[in-house]
Image (spheres, grey):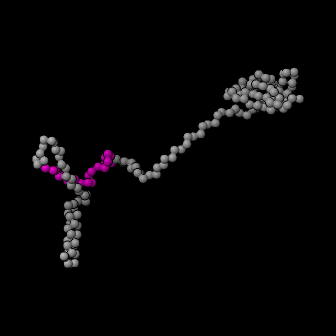
Amino acid sequence: MLSQRQRWALLGGALALSLLLAVWPDGGDKGSRAVVEVEPRRHASAKPQEQAPVLLAMSIDTLQRGASGEGEDKEVKNIFAHQSWFVPPPPPKPAPPAPPPLPFSYLGKVIDGNQVTVFVTQGDRNLALKTGDVVDGVYRVDTIAPPMMTFTFLPLSMQQSLEIGGAN
């Protein structure tokens, strides 16, 4: 067995040798070098003794990174970026078109037998309406049955009602 002094001398020598080998192959260059052993392809007819491996020495600093050349800016993708599998729901469907509020105000009515005439105002106009009348090509009077009068808004073919009160 080795004495403690001999062990320390052996470890110190191994340390000095490893430091010497780590610094010596650089030859004072700032770039690091790598030695790559490349074996040529062997054909089926070639014998292993005929071909010797080829050693290549190259500087790692001269190698290009990826597919981009020097001077090109390559976007670096963050592989640890937050990723969510949440799929947002589709946007709500737009509301179906609705007719504007009725522009008529009830004034009164006259019942003559089976014929009912309703008096309404539209803005500053006074109108006398009967079943089947069309106002400005926009509203058609469908039915007059007290207490309701039904109009059809022609651009959308939608019905609207106006309260006209009960029969007198």
User: As displayed, is residue 12 above or below residue 104?
Assistant: below
Q: Quadrant of residue 117?
A: top right
Counting from the top left corner in percent of width and height, residue 41 is at 18, 44
Residue 73 vs residue 137, the one in the foreground: 137
Counting from the top left corner in percent of width and height, residue 51 is at 12, 47
Would you say residue 68 sits in the magenta stretch?
yes
Q: Quadrant of the C terminus?
A: top right
Residue 127 seen: no
Q: Is residue 143 left or right of residue 52?
A: right
Provide the residue span drawn in magenta. 52-71
The residue at the point 27 percent across, 54 percent down is 61
The residue at the point 40 percent across, 49 percent down is 77
Q: Is residue 38 left or right of residue 103?
A: left
Q: Quadrant of residue 60?
A: bottom left
The residue at the point 72 percent across, 24 percent down is 137
Counting from the top left corner in percent of width and height, residue 5 is at 20, 78
Residue 70 vs residue 158, the one in the foreground: 158
Q: Quadrant of the N terminus?
A: bottom left
The residue at the point 15 percent across, 42 percent down is 43
Residue 93 vs residue 3, the one in the foreground: 3
Q: Is residue 26 left or right of residue 158?
A: left
